Amino acid sequence: MAPYTDREVLELVRMVELETLDVRTTTLGINLLDCADPDLESTCEKIYTKVVHHASKLVETADSVAADFGVPIINKRIAVTPISLVAAASGADNLVPIAKAMDAAAKEVGVDFIAGFTAYVHKGFTRADDALMNSIPEALDVTDHVCSSVSLASTKAGINMDATRRFTQVVMETANRTADRGGLGACKLVCFSNVVEDNPFVAGAHIGIGEAETVLSVGVSGPGVVRSALARLSPDDDLTAVAETIKRTSFKITRIGELVGRETAKRLNTIFGIVDVSLAPTPAIGDSVADILELIGVDVTGAPGTTAALALLTDAVKKGGLMASSSVGGLSGAFIPVSEDQGMIEAVRKGALSLAKLEAMTTVCSVGLDMVAVPGDISEDILMGIIADEMAVGMVNTKTTACRIIPVPGLGPGDTVEWGGLLGTGIVQDPGKFGCANLLRRGGRIPAPMQGFRN
Amino acid sequence: MTRRFLTAEDVRRLIQSGGELVVDAETVVTPQALEAAQAAGVTINSGSGGAWQVPQPDRGPDAARAMKSLSNLPEPEGGASDGRGVIITVVGKNRSGVLAEITAHLATAGCNIHKVSQEIVEGYFHLVLTVELDGSSSFNSLKSGIECLGGEDDFVARAMHERVFRFMHRV
């Protein structure tokens, strides 16, 4: 057997015990296209049955892999086919029963989220897309585990501004319906530009139509590990050394994800999909992407220099991760979910991290405006403008961007909302006084940009 | 052609039309369909004879090829190919008797020690043992046994499959 140096052995043990190295999620994607039925109740029956049939061993298998390798697997999740496709054959206007069936299946198998209450409307609406959008507010109110997403734009299609306006209304209604829980419903809802079919993270996970029957994907996480590696550098080490350190650390973190993914897929007898190499923070102390940016050299996250630092971080994470895995996919970069990152929360509290700066940061990192709290009385046109801007960033830069934005009922700029658990603490940002009422009134589509025409 | 599902509605329709409740072995029968059949006093049979049983999950037409490809994916070399290699780490405040406690436990746990190394840094010891499980021992019982040793204000012991270290530190 190959000997390992003590340094090599203790490095991994230290990463797990002290630096919060973990596998953030093992997500089982399950195709539900064959659950379509002219009768909605039968559709629900099939969805519940198929999810339980395929995922009944997911939690125990992931737990046994975690025990064998000594690396925690924090979440087990399910991603399904966009429900608007599955529900279409039923002709139903109200798809809440499907969300309830998904929720019941998630409870039965013991996963924390089941995502895929989803529609793609970046070019237009089908009847089923319309039904799904109408159903989102109630679905996210009455269920605990269901997540929802909507594709509003792409580099190939442009931005569907009618859909963006509609989505804005859905966000507001979802938040208002869950006002007693700080607008929690909107924490489980996200929109995308250039949506990906294999994202294992919520709220946007679903299994795209190009995928197989079932597929097991992994999301790794290790901001704490990267942070600790950078903390061991000298302040005189230059940015090339910083990038190299992040790249090498990302390689090691991703190797764990690759091993866990291969073994979990093997034990579940299913296809191994991808490793999403994203650095995903949690509210735990030391597990913060903002801390990393500050170690790279920014005074406080949100100050000038932040976008450049984040560009370095995201690129180095990708370079290390790509070598480490046989199949990288999903979002793969750096996440900046404001409420889920202790350093980000502090930066907002200090007044250093504004909405405008967050938008700038999304041009270089992998997610978008994520877990951003805004005032509960925000006007429709201002909220739509924020979302449309984020869609435009993704469309023009040929990258995925997303918007998970929560108008918190009853709260104003500077107020705090506790969503708890992984969702963390939201501090309401100030979106300003000016909006885009005429843009909203015009509607229509922003055409696909030149970048979409590569043939 | 295999019918993918049998729903309660299918059962009610078949019973009403006087048809038999026979499905393919691969068909997934929903819990509601089973209840509906039971309520009507009818058994759902499998086409291959006998009562229908829950099939193995159908992972799709390309799953077999993908599983074969998964087993053939290169892994870093150098480890015990049968998965018997285990790395045990013990970290704690330096005191006498720790190594004796650990090796005494391993002697009863059915493993062969390949390498032991220890270093004391600033009053804390780091002990790393590379062991191989013998044919009859299980990793789970070794792990739970070793991790119960030590305790608060004493040492922390961890057992992990050698494969994890190989994945991280070898190409």
Image (cartoon, rainbow, N blue to C red):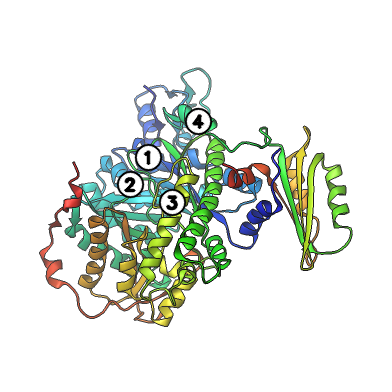
Q: Nearer the viewer, mark 2 or mark 4?
A: 4
Q: Position of residue A418 (x, y in %)?
A: 46, 73
Residue carrying label 1: A32
Left/right of residue B14 with respect to residue B137 in the rendered view:
left
Which quadrant is home to the N terminus of chain A? top right
Q: Amino acid at mark 2?
A: Ile
Element at label 1: loop
Identify the residue at horizontal 62%, vertical 45% (top origin): B164
Asked whether the beta carbons under mark 3 and mark 2 sit within 8 Å of each other, the answer is: no
Instruction: Give residue A81's quadrant in the image.
Output: top left
Q: Position of residue A254 (x, y in %)?
A: 51, 50
Residue carrying label 3: A319
Which quadrant is home to the C terminus of chain A? top left
Q: Amino acid at mark 3?
A: Lys
Element at label 4: helix
Residue carrying label 2: A83
State whether discs 2 and 1 lie on one chain: yes
Residue situated in front as seen by the camera: A228 or A122: A228
Name which of mark 2 and mark 1 comes first in the sequence: 1
Q: Amino acid at mark 1?
A: Leu
Residue carrying label 4: B67
State whether discs 3 and 2 lie on one chain: yes
Q: Position of residue B19 (x, y in %)?
A: 38, 22
Asked whether the beta carbons under mark 2 and mark 1 sit within 8 Å of each other, the answer is: yes
Element at label 3: helix
Identify the residue at horizontal 78%, vertical 35% (top origin): B134
Element at label 2: helix
